[in-house]
Image: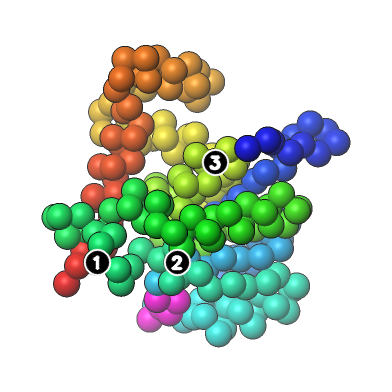
Amino acid sequence: MENLHDETGDNINTLFSIGHSNQKMKKFVELLKKNDITTVLDVRSKPYSKHSQQFNKEKIKSELEKVNIAYKFMGEVFGARQKDKSLYSPEGYLDFEKVKNSPKFLESVAKIIEKISNGENLSLMCSEKEPINCHRTILIAKAFYDKEIDIKHILIDGNIISQSKIEEKLLILYNFPHETQSSLDSFKNTEKSNNIDYIQKAYEMKNKEIANHLD
């Protein structure tokens, strides 16, 4: 996929992500406005919360519309609780690789990439505040990152962490060989030449750790 650039040379093929956690709606909206988000893509399978009812589907949709931010529920396609049992591993947990290669997932990814290419500023939204512990990062953002979409995770304190930095953290978390972010591309090339994909292994381990299990 050819990267698009703005007049300053910056990559504009960007997808954001955010976790609402239990913060106030006002603060949540401020984070979205700060990053010029035009549409929130809700990737929760169940868009309701007992502890943070301000983020229930109807409520958040209404609040976002007040500040001219669109809301789209995508839990059926991107949610962590899939109904299709063929998408689960023999051990009974949702296999993110199977989900990423499913027709409806691929179709939705292609549509979103088209919107991004047309200048829309979109953000995935789930409930988990820590990107590394959420399927929006390990499953969904990874799928877009593999297609050369720049991923920016909005943290609750307003800072941004990249998908590349998430990968560094995954390698450290599971004690795999790792490099600094500045030399991560070089590391990937070395890793592939040795036929060992430590980053993919780390994603798979986090998948198993956080995935939903069949009842």
* Residue farthest along the left direction in this orientation: 91
Q: Secondary structure at mark 1?
A: helix
The disc, 1 or 2, on the residue closer to the chain's N-terminal end is 2
Q: How many marks?
A: 3
Q: Amino acid at mark 3?
A: Lys
Q: Report the residue marked by disc 3.
A: 147
Q: Inspect this view and state whether residue 178 appears.
A: yes
Q: Report the residue marked by disc 2.
A: 77
Count neighbours of disc 2 (C-alpha within 10 A) and say few if under 14, some if 14 to 19, many if 20 or more: many
Quadrant of the drawing holding the N terminus: top right
Q: Residue at x 43, y 22 (%)?
A: 188
Residue 85 numbered tag: 1
Residue 113 percent coordinates (x, y): 63, 52
How much space separates mark 3 and mark 1, taking CA atoms?
26 Å
Q: Inspect this view and state whether residue 127 appears.
A: no
The disc, 2 or 3, on the residue closer to the chain's N-terminal end is 2
Viewer-side residue, 81 vs 66: 81
How much space separates mark 1 and mark 2, taking CA atoms?
14 Å
Range of the magenta residues?
Answer: 46-50
Residue 154 percent coordinates (x, y): 56, 51
Q: Residue at x 72, y 42 (%)?
A: 12
Q: Quadrant of residue 170?
A: top left
Is residue 47 rendered to the left or right of residue 60?
Answer: left
Q: Amino acid at mark 2?
A: Val
How much space separates mark 2 and mark 3, taking CA atoms?
18 Å
Q: Amino acid at mark 1?
A: Lys
Viewer-side residue, 18 vs 151: 151
Position of 138 relative to 68 (above/below): above
Is residue 198 rendered to the left or right of residue 113?
Answer: left
